[in-house]
Amino acid sequence: MITKILIFCFFALHRTKADIYDEYECFSPLMQRAAVSATSSMRDRGPKNAILYGGNAWTAENNDFDQQLIIDLGQVMNVTRIWTQGRSHSNEYVMEYSISYGTNGLDYADYKESGGDVRLFKGNTDGDSVHKNEFEVPIIAQWIRINPTRWRDRISLRVELFGCEYDSEIMYFNGTSYILLDLLRDPISAYRESIRFRFKTSVANGVLLYSRGTQGDYVALQLRDNRMLLNIDLGSGISTSLSVGSLLDDNIWHDVVISRNYRDILFSVDRVVVQGRIKGEFGKLNLNRGFYVGGVPNMQEGLVVVQNFTGCIENIYLNSTNLIRDMKESFQTRSSLHYTIVNAEFGCLDVPLISVTFLTPDSFARLKGYEGVSSLNASFAFRTYEEVGLMLYHSFSSSGHVAIYLEEGKIKVELVTPNNPPVILDNYDEQFNDGRWHIVVLTIGINSLTLSVDYRPMKTTRFLKMTTGGIYMIAGGVTGAIGLSGQKLPGFVGCMRTISIDGNYKLPTDWTTEEYCCKKEDVIFDACRMTDRCNPNPCEHGGICKQNAQEFLCDCVGTGYGGSVCHTSLSALSCQAYKNVQAVNQQAQIKIDVDGSGPLAPFPVTCEFYADGRVATVLHHSNQQPTPVDGFQEPGSFRQDIVYEADNDQIEALLNRSTSCRQTIQYACRSTRLFNSPSDEANFHPFSWWVSRHNQKMDYWGGALPGSRKCECGILGSCIDPTKWCNCDAGYERWAEDSGDITEKENLPVKQLRFGDTGNPLDEKESRYTLGPLICEGDDLFNNVVTFRVADATINLPPFDMGHSGDIYFEFKTTIDNAVLLHARGPTDYVKLSIVNGDMMQFQYQAGSAPLTVNYKTSYRLADDRWHSVSIERNRKGARLVLDGAVKSEVREDTGPVRALHLTSELVVGATVDYRHGYTGCIRALLLNGKLIDLRNYAVQGLYGVSEGCVGKCSSNPCLNNGTCLERYDGYNCDCRWTAFKGPICADEIGVNLRQSSMVKYDFMGSWRSTLSEKIRVGFTTTNPKGFLLGFASNITGEYLTIMVSNSGHLRIVFDFGFERQEIIYPQKHFGLGQYHDLRVSRKNGGGTLVMQVDDYEPREFHFNIKASADAQFNNIQYMYIGKNESMTEGFIGCISRVEFDDIYPLKLLFQENGPPNVKSLGTPLTEDFCGVEPITHPPEITETRPPPIINEDKLREAYNQTDSAILGSVLAIIFIALVILAILIGRYLHRHKGEYLTQEDAGAESAIDPDSAVIHGTTGHQVQKKKEWFI
């Protein structure tokens, strides 16, 4: 997108049809005269079949990423677009491809996106349709190479390139030359300008463009360490620097575009774009001195390199003027007063500087030198990113060897000679695996060795005598041990050039197959095929990029971020987030990152955790101590800027996320005034004030209201002088104070304090102020909560552009074991986050290649109805899953082109995009790339199946009788194990209908209990007003408790716990009338108080005097009886249910399948009964169903536009006419007119073959017969 903007700016503002090619007219087909080849092809499907609209297609023999279609256009062309097809009438087509280009078939460069990644072009969706791609910046090249990266079934391709011939104006600069355009007569004074050109060079440093003006403006474009650097100043005296590109000294053509609009500037090299804003206040560039191309005569302001450019520059445009063409025409017409050429030449002088690239550690070269001599000289230039590698090895014929190699990026020399111990020379401290060209020269003579690196010689003198061998190994090929490690060194991976052995230089392109190894693909000639993976820097948040031939690595130390590309913050999102995952005390000093992986850096805060659950975030500043103010009489003459431990953007993000914030401000005064109150709005002239974060002078003090011009005492009416609105405004000689909290978030924090009316150091006026830290409470991040109460309910967010790097963070609480939490997809790509089996989190995604999965199985349950945090990150190297802030799992992607995730659907939260495998539970704090998504806003709009807050079905306590509610969010289950009931809501009675001979006995079987506070419950109904309900006994201590219905129909409780026998009668009600009653009995106060509650009546308490020598403990309970005990002959007649004693439910155990042996019924067999109590039920819930999809009427109208309606109307008219004609024909057939005529033909002669046969076979003889003829 940035590239499009750049090109648009350039062409829209500065293009003229005469001087710049018009890409809209540059669309001639180019394949007709092109030569096409391929890395492989199937029989009868060779590269010559790769013709658009052709009957066949090119089909690669192998389906892998190494397949390429190579197009030689015959000459350098301007290529503007590409159209592709697959193989016709098949599912063989290319869905995605990359493009590289060059000028000689060897110097290929990748077509890149503005961010520096290889551009992956979208291909076809079937074998027949044509997919068209435009090059926003046209390709200037002779060779085009198409590399399929994604395909269907097989790699099959038909292609057409479009463009036109390329006009080239080139100048060669030798390092001492330059071109001067004199601007004295025609100065540049503009708010907008653009510069565009192409260049190639083999030198890493040089001045390309320079110009300046008399007002201090300048623009300086230069190569520094093979990167492009632009310095610009619009006259403010502040330089703005932009840098882009790398490895630009590779002697291939590079495109440069600079476009400025006022202070906004875009700078592009090979389509990789950086944009910036020029520092200072000015927007016009004023240049009235010389405009230099290729160098300068002397050092100038803004230049950081001292060399002039060496190489070729092509078609340099200043706005709409091609300077080289204009200069050439000026010289031809002898009107070249504006131009001066110094040592520059027209055309491009190609220096035979041929590079060779060793792509693998196993590739090497084997070159010959002079054999049998006592000295040697070897030199070469190299560039690499590898830390280790053998660069040169020579074995002496007199035994021993010399080796030059890289170890930890440093150049070392190993020398082994006869009668001498091996020596390793390590004379250079710096590392040389920086991707720059370095020149190495090794000279060995008698008793002397000299190593020179980048023209810095290091000479070693020692006893040394050797005789050279005949072979020099370059870049590897040695199996013996080298270096201190005593192991085989891998071969050199990188580029070399100017390899000279004993003064003999042989071009790599002239090497024979015996002189290099091994595969042709491992050694590349006439090009330095290296990729700078660290430019632009893929490491985020200031991470340091390191690389080798295969990949880049990010050093995130000190950045506050982690992961493969330093994307994920290591700091908590807030103090509340820190508390959610850490055990905390009252206070913690931490760093928080309010936007997670966003651009805001972490900053230090103090977290305060209160007993009531509140969490406060304290942001400190540098002026929290009381500060005296004296000797500043004029209003606001004392000024104190407040510097916080966070910048403005960080503070604003903290304020926006917080529920409330406050800052205490205090002013103590003696004989000094604060606001000079009272005053009206028009005459408010305070002596002191504070400034808000928006640089506004505020008209109220802490504790007052905005606009009130008062202090807190003025609001409360408690000022020491009732006529004033601030205590300090009284001007008393004794100390007074105005203080309070500023609570308006839109004004916080205090940015500046201004004070006056403090006299001079000699008078009695004095004051001091204290400004407290900024304190915020609450975190809207965790207040943004929604509940998914239906399995197919979703929140559909706009498509999420995860691109090359993105992350998603949220917290969830659920009880569902298997569900999809997030899902989005594109034509082929997708992302999906799921919870699996209740204890595994699974992140699946596909970015062009095969699907990848990141799993992490926890040692605890995730579906435990507790909050858990999850963070997923996909970056250029792979994906990472973080659970609960600590548990991590990663997956690495294969090396190859870095694909952006192409997601076109909505980001669906709560299910898949087709509403399957839905999630039920709560989700909060959803962040996409650090930006909070307001899920709560979707819920308040009445979205199907989604509620605001985290509210489950158990919040209404649907389980009765102390049953435990198990949350499902779309429903609930009741756990009745710890109740005396059963059923779906623990409301079904478990009772027994007893006869006189029946009883239930529960034996504690050695697990005897001793209690001071029992909880006993029993429900019953009877018409026989007497009987034993429930009893407990201990044969060991003789203690007991019995609950019975007396003969009078009253409840009676008798017990003896060792202090004395007690009897309690509940006489207010008759319990033998067949009504159901619910009795609860408990004790408290150390067993001295018994509480009895019958049905829903008020509980009654009975107190007992217990002697000091006794206790009320019910000791060693052995048995529990229901209905009667073993000493009784007649038991209770009626129904008993709801029996419980603390956590024992004997009737439930009795009727339990395979129940325990310690509970049994004796006497008459018993069956379960509900005692006539019908179970309570809840009203049925309203079933929610997903509403029908909303139809987009605009799109529907577009589907039936006017053209389609006309066609449809014509078709209907034709059908109508056809139906009318058919109806007429049918009518004529049904209403035929019948006529008659006479014939002399014999009956039966119709089938005769001639007249005679007709007479012979006639059955009726000659007669007149009526025949009928039908008229239509």
Image (cartoon, grey):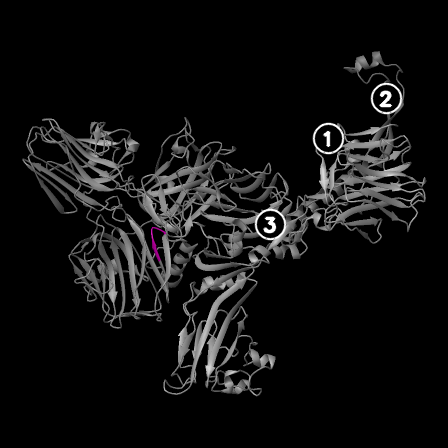
Residue at image position (89%, 40%) is 1172
- Identity of the amino acid at label 2? Gln
Neighbours of disc 1 within 10 Å: few (<14), some (14-19), many (20+) = few
- Identity of the amino acid at label 1? Met
Q: Please name the residue that numbered disc 2 is placed on.
A: 1240
Residue 1005's mark?
1
Residue at image position (44%, 59%) is 604
**290 or 470, which is in the foreground?**
470
Disc nearer the start of the sequence (2/1): 1
Q: In the shown orientation, is residue 1029 left or right of residue 662?
A: right
Residue at image position (83%, 38%) is 1030
Splitting the image into 4 quarters, where does residue 338 fall? bottom left
Neighbours of disc 2 within 10 Å: few (<14), some (14-19), many (20+) = few
Secondary structure of the residue carrying tag 2 is loop
Splitting the image into 4 quarters, where does residue 1055 fall? top right
| Image: 1106 above or below 633 | above
Among all residues in the image, which is located at the extreme top? 1256
Secondary structure of the residue carrying tag 1 is loop
Q: Please name the residue that numbered disc 3 is placed on.
A: 923
- Identify the main secondary structure in magenta: strand
- Identity of the amino acid at label 3? Ile
Q: In the shown orientation, is residue 661 left or right of residue 1175?
A: left
Residue at image position (53%, 78%) is 700
| Image: 1003 above or below 830 | above
